[in-house]
Image (cartoon, helix red, strand yellow):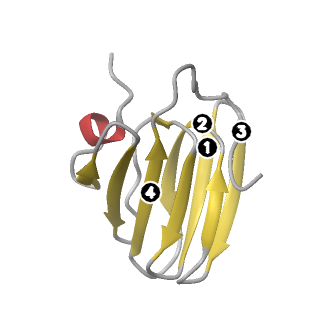
């Protein structure tokens, strides 16, 4: 089963650019929306809107409250999430394509 977010969560993720080095995803959701489990390789996240969400991986969960125009490094990870705020989420992910980059279960958020 694919854990590619553009396959598991087609209503939220779409590819806006891709080449041999990176894949760029546009992510949007509304308050109350929840994604199914998916994974990302090492990535850079740029927030276009302010939002609050709950990230979950196995028994671990973490609430994040991010402002618009925040840029964060995210290590490879597998998770699912829920918009627990009152505003829509709009984020750009720049996923790095590296040989051997595998998600680390339970690793969420900036490092």
Q: Earlier in the sequence, mark 2 or mark 4?
A: 2
The answer to the question of whether label 2 and label 1 lie on touching residues, with beta carbons closer than 8 A, is no
At 68% from the left and 46% from the top, the residue drawn is 108
Mark number, residue 77: 2
On the rendered structure, is 19 left or right of 60? left
The local secondary structure at tag 1 comes to strand
User: Where's residue 71, x and y in %?
Assistant: 60, 71
Dot 4 surroundings within 10 Å: few (below 14), some, or many (20 or more)?
A: many
CA gap, disc 2 and disc 1: 11 Å
Q: Nearer the viewer, residue 17 or 78?
A: 17
**Between tags 4 and 3, which lies in front?**
4
Q: Which mark is residue 93?
A: 4
- Spot the residue most to the top: 1
Where residue 97 sits: x, y (%)?
Answer: 45, 35
* Residue 56, label in figure: 1
Q: Earlier in the sequence, mark 4 or mark 3?
A: 4
4 up-or-down from 17: above or below? above
Q: Name which of mark 3 and mark 2 comes first in the sequence.
A: 2
Q: Position of residue 23 (x, y in %)?
A: 35, 46
Q: Quadrant of residue 63?
A: bottom right
Question: Dot 2 surroundings within 10 Å: few (below 14), some, or many (20 or more)?
Answer: many
Mark 2 vs mark 4, foreground winner is 4
Rendered position, 35 above or below 50: above
Disc 2 versus disc 4: distance between alpha carbons?
13 Å
**Which residue occupies 65% across, 73% down?**
65
Where disc 2 sits, the SS reads: strand
């Amino acid at each position: 089963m694919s854990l590619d977010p553009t396959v598991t969560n087609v209503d939220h993720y779409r590819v806006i650019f891709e080449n041999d080095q990176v894949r760029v995803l546009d992510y949007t959701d509304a308050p109350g929306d929840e994604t199914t489990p998916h994974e990302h390789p090492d990535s850079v996240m740029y927030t276009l809107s302010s939002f609050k969400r709950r990230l979950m991986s196995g028994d671990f969960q973490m609430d994040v409250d991010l402002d618009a125009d925040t840029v964060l490094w995210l290590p490879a990870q597998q998770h699912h999430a829920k918009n627990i705020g009152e505003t829509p989420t709009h984020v750009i992910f720049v996923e790095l394509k590296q040989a051997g980059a595998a998600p680390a279960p339970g690793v969420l958020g900036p490092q």
